[in-house]
Image (spheres, grey):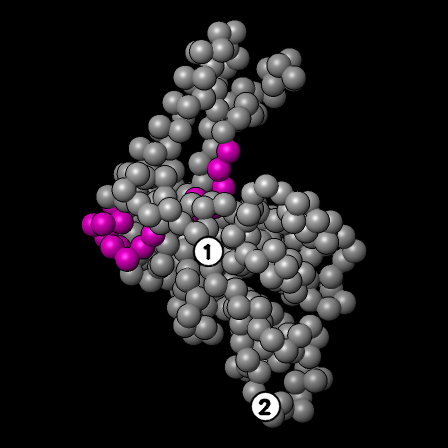
Amino acid sequence: MLWGGAALAAEKVSPYLNGVNVSYTDELAHRSSLIAHSIVTFKLVRFPGGLLADEYRWISGVGLGLKDGQTGTKGFAEFCEGIGAEKMITVNFKTGTAAEAANWVEFANGIAQEKIPAEWEKTPYAYYHSAPAGYFAYLRESMERKKPYAVKFWEIGNEIDWWNRIDAASYAREAVKFARAMRAKDKSILIGACASPMNDEWNKELLRIAGRHLDFVVIHIYGGPEKIYQDKDEEYKALFGKLEVAEQRLVKIKKLIKKYAPRCRIAVTESNTSYNEFGLGKDELKKWK
Protein backbone atom coordinates (compact mmCIF):
# COMPACT_ATOMS: atom_id res chain seq x y z
CA MET A 1 0.00 0.00 0.00
CA LEU A 2 1.22 3.46 -0.82
CA TRP A 3 0.30 6.54 1.16
CA GLY A 4 0.90 10.01 -0.20
CA GLY A 5 2.03 9.02 -3.67
CA ALA A 6 5.25 7.40 -2.50
CA ALA A 7 5.85 5.92 -5.95
CA LEU A 8 6.91 9.33 -7.16
CA ALA A 9 10.60 10.15 -6.74
CA ALA A 10 9.98 13.59 -5.23
CA GLU A 11 7.82 12.20 -2.44
CA LYS A 12 8.97 11.14 0.99
CA VAL A 13 8.56 7.39 1.43
CA SER A 14 5.44 6.66 3.44
CA PRO A 15 5.63 4.69 6.70
CA TYR A 16 2.66 2.74 5.32
CA LEU A 17 4.47 1.62 2.16
CA ASN A 18 4.05 -2.07 3.00
CA GLY A 19 0.52 -3.13 3.78
CA VAL A 20 -1.70 -6.18 3.51
CA ASN A 21 -5.39 -6.87 2.99
CA VAL A 22 -7.26 -9.31 5.21
CA SER A 23 -10.81 -10.56 4.87
CA TYR A 24 -13.45 -11.20 7.49
CA THR A 25 -13.41 -14.77 6.15
CA ASP A 26 -9.77 -15.20 7.25
CA GLU A 27 -8.75 -16.89 10.48
CA LEU A 28 -6.24 -14.25 11.49
CA ALA A 29 -4.77 -16.31 14.33
CA HIS A 30 -3.15 -18.51 11.69
CA ARG A 31 -2.06 -15.59 9.52
CA SER A 32 -0.43 -13.80 12.47
CA SER A 33 2.23 -16.48 12.68
CA LEU A 34 3.00 -16.24 8.95
CA ILE A 35 3.30 -12.46 9.03
CA ALA A 36 5.38 -12.52 12.21
CA HIS A 37 8.00 -14.58 10.34
CA SER A 38 7.80 -12.59 7.10
CA ILE A 39 10.81 -10.62 5.87
CA VAL A 40 8.39 -7.74 5.16
CA THR A 41 7.15 -5.53 7.99
CA PHE A 42 3.51 -4.63 7.38
CA LYS A 43 2.53 -1.23 8.75
CA LEU A 44 -1.05 -1.02 7.49
CA VAL A 45 -3.79 -3.68 7.39
CA ARG A 46 -7.06 -3.25 5.50
CA PHE A 47 -10.28 -5.00 6.53
CA PRO A 48 -12.82 -6.64 5.88
CA GLY A 49 -11.87 -7.43 2.29
CA GLY A 50 -12.07 -5.91 -1.19
CA LEU A 51 -15.30 -6.84 -2.96
CA LEU A 52 -16.46 -8.52 0.25
CA ALA A 53 -16.45 -5.18 2.06
CA ASP A 54 -19.51 -4.03 0.14
CA GLU A 55 -21.60 -6.93 1.36
CA TYR A 56 -20.25 -7.14 4.91
CA ARG A 57 -22.52 -6.26 7.84
CA TRP A 58 -20.15 -5.45 10.65
CA ILE A 59 -22.61 -6.32 13.43
CA SER A 60 -22.43 -9.95 12.27
CA GLY A 61 -18.88 -10.04 13.61
CA VAL A 62 -19.87 -9.01 17.14
CA GLY A 63 -20.46 -11.47 19.96
CA LEU A 64 -22.65 -14.46 19.11
CA GLY A 65 -23.02 -13.28 15.50
CA LEU A 66 -19.42 -14.24 14.73
CA LYS A 67 -19.21 -17.54 12.85
CA ASP A 68 -16.44 -20.11 13.22
CA GLY A 69 -13.51 -19.37 10.93
CA GLN A 70 -14.40 -15.71 10.53
CA THR A 71 -12.99 -12.53 12.01
CA GLY A 72 -14.81 -9.51 13.44
CA THR A 73 -13.64 -6.04 14.40
CA LYS A 74 -12.08 -7.28 17.65
CA GLY A 75 -10.04 -10.00 15.95
CA PHE A 76 -8.91 -7.61 13.23
CA ALA A 77 -7.89 -4.88 15.70
CA GLU A 78 -5.98 -7.26 17.94
CA PHE A 79 -4.28 -8.81 14.92
CA CYS A 80 -3.03 -5.34 13.91
CA GLU A 81 -1.92 -4.57 17.45
CA GLY A 82 -0.07 -7.87 17.57
CA ILE A 83 2.06 -7.06 14.50
CA GLY A 84 2.36 -3.32 15.23
CA ALA A 85 0.32 -2.16 12.23
CA GLU A 86 -2.11 0.72 11.69
CA LYS A 87 -5.73 -0.20 10.94
CA MET A 88 -7.86 0.60 7.89
CA ILE A 89 -11.53 -0.34 7.50
CA THR A 90 -13.54 -0.28 4.26
CA VAL A 91 -17.18 0.43 5.06
CA ASN A 92 -20.06 -1.08 3.13
CA PHE A 93 -21.19 1.48 0.54
CA LYS A 94 -23.10 -0.60 -2.00
CA THR A 95 -25.52 -2.34 0.37
CA GLY A 96 -24.88 -0.30 3.52
CA THR A 97 -25.78 3.17 4.74
CA ALA A 98 -24.05 6.21 6.17
CA ALA A 99 -25.67 5.49 9.55
CA GLU A 100 -24.33 1.92 9.54
CA ALA A 101 -20.83 3.19 8.76
CA ALA A 102 -21.04 5.84 11.48
CA ASN A 103 -22.18 3.26 14.01
CA TRP A 104 -19.15 1.15 13.13
CA VAL A 105 -16.88 4.14 13.79
CA GLU A 106 -18.50 4.60 17.20
CA PHE A 107 -18.25 0.88 17.95
CA ALA A 108 -14.55 0.86 17.06
CA ASN A 109 -13.42 4.20 18.50
CA GLY A 110 -16.07 5.51 20.87
CA ILE A 111 -15.96 5.79 24.66
CA ALA A 112 -19.12 4.79 26.50
CA GLN A 113 -20.69 7.15 29.00
CA GLU A 114 -20.28 6.27 32.64
CA LYS A 115 -23.99 5.90 33.40
CA ILE A 116 -25.77 3.56 30.99
CA PRO A 117 -29.56 3.81 30.57
CA ALA A 118 -31.21 0.64 31.82
CA GLU A 119 -33.07 0.07 28.54
CA TRP A 120 -29.79 -0.30 26.63
CA GLU A 121 -29.29 -3.70 28.19
CA LYS A 122 -32.67 -4.80 26.89
CA THR A 123 -32.93 -3.04 23.51
CA PRO A 124 -30.83 -4.48 20.68
CA TYR A 125 -30.76 -1.43 18.38
CA ALA A 126 -30.32 -2.40 14.75
CA TYR A 127 -26.89 -1.37 13.46
CA TYR A 128 -28.35 0.30 10.37
CA HIS A 129 -30.93 2.34 12.29
CA SER A 130 -30.47 5.35 14.52
CA ALA A 131 -29.49 4.55 18.07
CA PRO A 132 -28.80 6.79 21.07
CA ALA A 133 -25.38 8.44 20.98
CA GLY A 134 -22.88 6.24 22.74
CA TYR A 135 -24.86 3.01 22.37
CA PHE A 136 -22.38 1.27 20.08
CA ALA A 137 -19.41 2.25 22.23
CA TYR A 138 -21.33 0.69 25.12
CA LEU A 139 -21.92 -2.41 22.97
CA ARG A 140 -18.18 -2.84 22.39
CA GLU A 141 -17.36 -2.31 26.07
CA SER A 142 -20.03 -4.74 27.22
CA MET A 143 -19.36 -7.49 24.64
CA GLU A 144 -15.68 -7.19 23.68
CA ARG A 145 -13.36 -4.80 25.51
CA LYS A 146 -13.32 -1.40 27.19
CA LYS A 147 -10.33 0.06 25.33
CA PRO A 148 -11.29 1.51 21.90
CA TYR A 149 -9.81 -0.15 18.83
CA ALA A 150 -8.55 3.23 17.55
CA VAL A 151 -9.08 2.60 13.84
CA LYS A 152 -7.41 5.51 12.07
CA PHE A 153 -8.16 5.03 8.36
CA TRP A 154 -11.65 4.55 6.87
CA GLU A 155 -12.49 3.97 3.20
CA ILE A 156 -15.98 4.52 1.71
CA GLY A 157 -16.67 1.43 -0.40
CA ASN A 158 -14.44 -0.64 -2.66
CA GLU A 159 -13.78 0.10 -6.35
CA ILE A 160 -17.01 2.05 -6.77
CA ASP A 161 -15.68 3.44 -10.07
CA TRP A 162 -16.17 -0.07 -11.54
CA TRP A 163 -19.76 -0.32 -10.30
CA ASN A 164 -22.07 0.50 -13.22
CA ARG A 165 -25.02 1.47 -10.99
CA ILE A 166 -23.75 4.89 -9.92
CA ASP A 167 -22.01 7.83 -11.60
CA ALA A 168 -19.13 9.82 -10.15
CA ALA A 169 -21.20 12.83 -9.06
CA SER A 170 -23.78 10.67 -7.27
CA TYR A 171 -21.07 8.67 -5.51
CA ALA A 172 -19.30 11.87 -4.49
CA ARG A 173 -22.46 13.31 -2.95
CA GLU A 174 -23.12 10.08 -1.06
CA ALA A 175 -19.48 9.97 0.07
CA VAL A 176 -19.97 13.41 1.63
CA LYS A 177 -22.95 12.06 3.60
CA PHE A 178 -20.90 9.09 4.78
CA ALA A 179 -17.94 11.28 5.75
CA ARG A 180 -20.09 13.72 7.72
CA ALA A 181 -21.88 10.92 9.59
CA MET A 182 -18.65 9.11 10.39
CA ARG A 183 -16.79 12.23 11.54
CA ALA A 184 -19.69 13.08 13.83
CA LYS A 185 -18.67 9.96 15.77
CA ASP A 186 -14.91 10.61 15.74
CA LYS A 187 -13.34 13.80 14.39
CA SER A 188 -9.83 12.31 14.45
CA ILE A 189 -10.35 9.65 11.78
CA LEU A 190 -8.98 9.95 8.23
CA ILE A 191 -11.51 9.21 5.49
CA GLY A 192 -10.94 8.20 1.87
CA ALA A 193 -13.13 7.57 -1.17
CA CYS A 194 -12.70 5.55 -4.36
CA ALA A 195 -10.93 7.28 -7.21
CA SER A 196 -10.32 5.58 -10.54
CA PRO A 197 -6.98 4.40 -11.93
CA MET A 198 -8.12 5.16 -15.50
CA ASN A 199 -11.12 7.50 -15.53
CA ASP A 200 -9.96 11.12 -15.18
CA GLU A 201 -13.51 12.45 -15.42
CA TRP A 202 -14.58 10.29 -12.47
CA ASN A 203 -11.67 11.62 -10.42
CA LYS A 204 -12.43 15.22 -11.37
CA GLU A 205 -16.06 14.93 -10.25
CA LEU A 206 -15.16 13.09 -7.05
CA LEU A 207 -12.59 15.68 -6.03
CA ARG A 208 -14.67 18.66 -7.13
CA ILE A 209 -17.71 17.60 -5.09
CA ALA A 210 -16.27 15.64 -2.18
CA GLY A 211 -12.61 16.61 -2.04
CA ARG A 212 -12.82 19.01 0.89
CA HIS A 213 -14.50 16.30 2.99
CA LEU A 214 -11.80 13.71 2.27
CA ASP A 215 -8.31 13.07 3.60
CA PHE A 216 -7.28 10.72 0.81
CA VAL A 217 -8.46 9.06 -2.39
CA VAL A 218 -8.01 5.37 -3.09
CA ILE A 219 -6.96 3.69 -6.31
CA HIS A 220 -6.18 0.07 -7.14
CA ILE A 221 -3.50 -0.79 -9.67
CA TYR A 222 -3.42 -4.19 -11.32
CA GLY A 223 -1.50 -5.07 -14.44
CA GLY A 224 0.65 -7.61 -16.17
CA PRO A 225 1.61 -8.84 -19.64
CA GLU A 226 -1.48 -9.25 -21.80
CA LYS A 227 -0.01 -12.21 -23.65
CA ILE A 228 2.62 -14.90 -23.18
CA TYR A 229 6.07 -13.91 -24.45
CA GLN A 230 8.62 -16.44 -25.65
CA ASP A 231 11.33 -13.77 -25.53
CA LYS A 232 12.12 -13.03 -21.88
CA ASP A 233 13.48 -9.56 -22.68
CA GLU A 234 10.19 -8.64 -24.32
CA GLU A 235 8.33 -10.13 -21.39
CA TYR A 236 10.41 -8.02 -18.98
CA LYS A 237 9.66 -4.83 -20.94
CA ALA A 238 5.93 -5.59 -20.99
CA LEU A 239 5.85 -6.32 -17.28
CA PHE A 240 7.70 -3.20 -16.16
CA GLY A 241 6.01 -1.08 -18.80
CA LYS A 242 2.84 -1.56 -16.76
CA LEU A 243 4.59 0.00 -13.79
CA GLU A 244 5.40 3.08 -15.86
CA VAL A 245 1.72 3.35 -16.78
CA ALA A 246 0.80 3.09 -13.08
CA GLU A 247 3.15 5.96 -12.25
CA GLN A 248 1.63 8.07 -15.02
CA ARG A 249 -1.82 7.45 -13.51
CA LEU A 250 -0.61 8.63 -10.12
CA VAL A 251 0.82 11.80 -11.66
CA LYS A 252 -2.54 12.57 -13.33
CA ILE A 253 -4.44 12.10 -10.10
CA LYS A 254 -1.97 14.30 -8.22
CA LYS A 255 -2.60 17.12 -10.69
CA LEU A 256 -6.35 16.89 -10.12
CA ILE A 257 -5.82 16.80 -6.36
CA LYS A 258 -3.69 19.94 -6.55
CA LYS A 259 -6.49 21.72 -8.40
CA TYR A 260 -9.57 20.54 -6.50
CA ALA A 261 -8.51 19.18 -3.10
CA PRO A 262 -4.94 20.13 -2.17
CA ARG A 263 -5.00 18.49 1.25
CA CYS A 264 -5.97 15.06 -0.14
CA ARG A 265 -3.40 12.32 -0.49
CA ILE A 266 -3.33 9.05 -2.44
CA ALA A 267 -3.67 5.54 -1.04
CA VAL A 268 -3.01 2.52 -3.26
CA THR A 269 -4.69 -0.15 -1.17
CA GLU A 270 -4.57 -2.97 -3.75
CA SER A 271 -1.87 -3.61 -6.33
CA ASN A 272 -0.32 -6.52 -8.16
CA THR A 273 1.74 -7.17 -11.26
CA SER A 274 1.51 -10.69 -12.63
CA TYR A 275 -0.02 -12.91 -15.21
CA ASN A 276 -3.68 -12.95 -14.33
CA GLU A 277 -7.16 -13.66 -15.66
CA PHE A 278 -7.70 -9.95 -16.37
CA GLY A 279 -4.75 -9.87 -18.78
CA LEU A 280 -4.64 -13.34 -20.30
CA GLY A 281 -8.11 -14.80 -20.08
CA LYS A 282 -8.92 -17.99 -18.19
CA ASP A 283 -8.32 -20.46 -21.04
CA GLU A 284 -4.93 -19.05 -21.98
CA LEU A 285 -3.93 -18.81 -18.34
CA LYS A 286 -4.65 -22.54 -17.87
CA LYS A 287 -2.46 -23.41 -20.86
CA TRP A 288 0.37 -21.25 -19.53
CA LYS A 289 0.19 -22.89 -16.11
Q: Secondary structure at mark 2?
A: loop
Q: Which residue is mark 1?
A: 156
Q: How many neighbours does mark 1 have within 10 angstroms: few (below 14), some (14-19), or many (20 or more)?
A: many
Q: How many marks?
A: 2
Q: Residue at x 60, y 92 (%)?
A: 115
The verdict on residue 159 being magenta is no
Q: Residue at x 34, y 34 (%)?
A: 247
Q: Residue placed farthest to the top in the image?
A: 230
Left/right of residue 49 with respect to residue 210 in the rendered view = right
Q: Residue at x 44, y 11 (%)?
A: 233
Q: Residue placed farthest to the left in the image?
A: 259
Q: Residue at x 30, y 45 (%)?
A: 11
Classify the position of the C terminus by image quarter: top right
Say which amino acid is labelled 2: Glu
The verdict on residue 271 being magenta is yes
Left/right of residue 158 with respect to residue 139 in the rendered view = left
Distance CA(mark 1)–CA(mark 2): 31 Å
Is residue 5 visible from the viewing direction of this image? yes
Say which amino acid is labelled 1: Ile
Q: Is residue 19 above or below residue 283?
A: below
The residue segment tinted magenta is 256-272
Q: Which residue is mark 2?
A: 114
Residue 111 image offset from top left, x and y in percent: 55, 80
Q: Is residue 246 above or below residue 123?
A: above
Q: Is residue 6 above or below residue 129?
A: above
